[in-house]
Image (tube, helix red, strand yellow):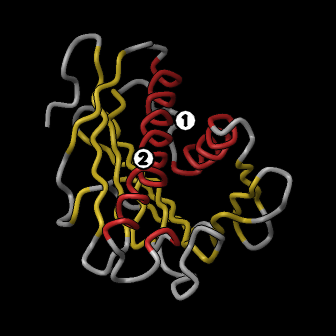
Amino acid sequence: MDVKAKRDEWEIACQQVLLQDSSVFSIQWMVVPRGCTATLTPPFLLDKYLAHIRRFTCALIRPAKTAQGIEFRLFVTGLSLISFCLPSCRKDETGEALALDICGGLLVQRQEPRKGELSFQCVAVPEGVKITLQLSDYSPLLLGGCKPSKLRKLLYRLTQAYIHKIVTVKFLARIYRELTGQDVCVRVARVKAREGEET
């Protein structure tokens, strides 16, 4: 895939699908060119992402770090929309990754409270560093269970799936501009990383 489509345009790859068990898989990635990646690590991305969530939602959603992990809290209520366990890190010769296991929250199915993962990855590629955000095996409350109705699927697509995509794409665009100092246009390219029903 040609990550830089035009001189003044940068590409973010994106896919969101429902898997056979009706869990969600969502992935977005981009490549940051060499020379702009000195501070680029998964913990750096996580901190920037949490700040972005608060900023993007005008503090309606307030990420909070606790002794148990991270919670996306609703405004001043203290109610957690999604709760994550403490991050786990991995590093090898290709790059680094940080994973947050989902462990509950109002937007998570009660029968699947400890299923799913949000991960941040930085992998060296010939063009620079590939940044990937991936949400996998997430069971949204809106889908209701392993056999959601068409109405539930539509409601999920129009709300949570759409919001997650916009938030993530804008986050990656912000990171790119912050690291490179270039105010470029962003183009979203649909890719096929997993088989499933597109959302």
Q: For the view shown, which residue lies furthest in the left direction?
A: 1
Count of labels shown? 2
Q: For the view shown, which residue lies furthest in the front direction?
A: 151
- Residue identified by numbered label 1: 39
Estimate how packed mark 1 is, as few (under 14), some (14 to 19) or many (20 or more) residues with alpha carbons within 10 Å.
few
Residue under the point 47% across and 49% down: 164
Q: Earlier in the sequence, mark 2 or mark 1?
A: 1
Q: Nearer the viewer, residue 162 or 86?
A: 162
Inspect the image, locate mark 2, and give the three-letter code of the amino acid beneath it. Tyr
Q: Is residue 2 above or below residue 185?
A: below
Quarter assignment of residue 37: top left
For numbered disc 1, what is the local secondary structure?
Answer: loop
- Residue identified by numbered label 2: 162
For numbered disc 2, what is the local secondary structure?
Answer: helix
Percent across and percent down for residue 132 are 38, 49
Inspect the image, locate mark 1, and give the three-letter code of the amino acid beneath it. Thr
Q: Is residue 90 above or below residue 27?
A: below
Quarter assignment of residue 73: bottom right
Quarter assignment of residue 180: top left
